[in-house]
Amino acid sequence: MLEKNSFFVAPLAGITDRPFRTIVRDFSPDVSLVTEMISCHSLVEQHKNCPRNFDNYGAEGNIGAQIFGADVSLMADAARILQDNGAKWVDINMGCPVPKVATRAGAGAYLMRDHKLAGDIMRAVVRAVEIPVSVKTRLGWDSEHMDWRELVDIAADAGVKFMALHGRTRAAGYTGDAVHPDVHELPIPIIANGDIKDVSDVQAMENLGYAGVMVGRAMLGAPWKLAEIMGQNAPQDIGRIVLRHLDLVLDYYGERSGVPLFRKHAAWYSAGVPGATAFRVAVNQITDAQELKDKISEFWGCVAEI
Ligand SMILES: Cc1cc2nc3c(=O)[nH]c(=O)nc-3n(C[C@H](O)[C@H](O)[C@H](O)COP(=O)(O)O)c2cc1C
């Protein structure tokens, strides 16, 4: 069986922010988490509208901070900032398929097309910090270019400590079943990512030689999912968890941004519960934090702490 810190929560933009990570740690304090991707430009220029640029990770347990970008020296500077802010390791995004990142910025998944630039970024980031550096990537750009294995060698040569491999191509996006190649005898440990939902998936990944597993979408509306995969029972008091999550979001973002931002979480938490559609419609109209707390309490039949 894998060690606890070999279970990872995947980086999820707009989701694995500090409030969400805090809730995950309520259930599984020893797992490893990766932040949402952070732009090297935004971090180095200290853009004020992104609270994650100012996160301090010192008290957060085993956490990797993920950066994306195509500028070698800015990526190195960004990695240094994350190290200073207490990240336990730095992760380089080489898998994001969204056009804004992968085509327009030449970052994320685009780096699978430009191995020279990918290697330069890896080497510069490894040189810039004392903490470990990892890479998260996909099988390749498309089914004609499945060259993840070459990237593993480039990463190992550059001093990257481990790689998370999402078992899809950039072209596949998030569709189709993830495919997990055998990774025995590779020069660095590989973490399996893509469609991992239960203990039998974990066992299958171990059999294929993976050093760990990384869970993404199964955590939406279920921040206890990784703990469940590791053998704990799912919690019963969902309303209380939702209220705690909301309080953390309000503290972190403030009421004006926090209330609309929480709507998607409320929708995921309520999915499959009777009355969820009406609840979602009501929540989407609410702009006041206390009203949102009352609605959540009413829906799950618990009492909001004021
Ligand atoms: C909403 C959303 C946001 C994501 N954000 C990131 C990100 O910031 N960085 C990254 O490397 N991958 C990101 N991913 C990809 C996931 O980390 C993961 O590779 C993918 O969802 C496959 O794993 P899963 O099947 O367990 O969800 C994102 C995926 C989703 C659905």
Image: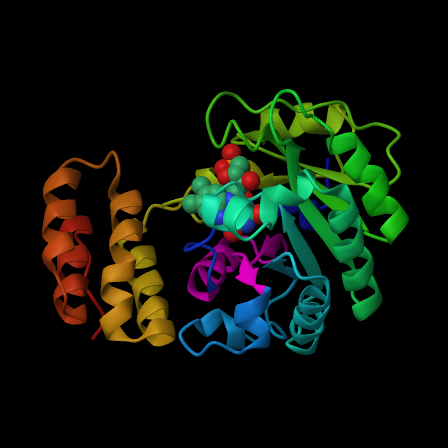
Which quadrant holds residue 40? bottom right
Residue 227 seen: no
The percent position of residue 113, horizontal first and vertical second, equals 68, 38
Which quadrant holds residue 183? top right
Which quadrant holds residue 20? bottom left
Which quarter of the rendered picture does the C terminus lie within?
Answer: bottom left
Residue 292 to residue 281: above or below? below
Q: Is residue 27 magenta?
A: yes
Q: From the viewer's perspective, is 301 left or right of 3?
A: left
Which region is colored magenta?
18-39
The percent position of residue 33, horizontal first and vertical second, equals 59, 55
Residue 104 seen: yes
Residue 32 to residue 277: above or below? below
Q: From the viewer's perspective, is 259 left or right of 288?
A: right
Which quarter of the rendered picture does the N terminus lie within?
Answer: top right
Residue sitting nearer the eye, 50 or 227 = 50
Residue 166 to residue 55: above or below? above
The percent position of residue 242, horizontal first and vertical second, equals 30, 56
Residue 266 to residue 275: above or below? below
Q: Residue at x 14, y 66 (%)?
A: 287
Q: How many marks?
A: 0
Q: From the viewer's perspective, is 158 left or right of 110?
A: right
Q: Residue at x 23, y 73 (%)?
A: 256
Q: Residue at x 20, y 66 (%)?
A: 304
Residue lying at the far front in this picture: please name it: 104
Colour option used? rainbow
Q: Is residue 151 magenta?
A: no
The percent position of residue 267, horizontal first and vertical second, equals 25, 46
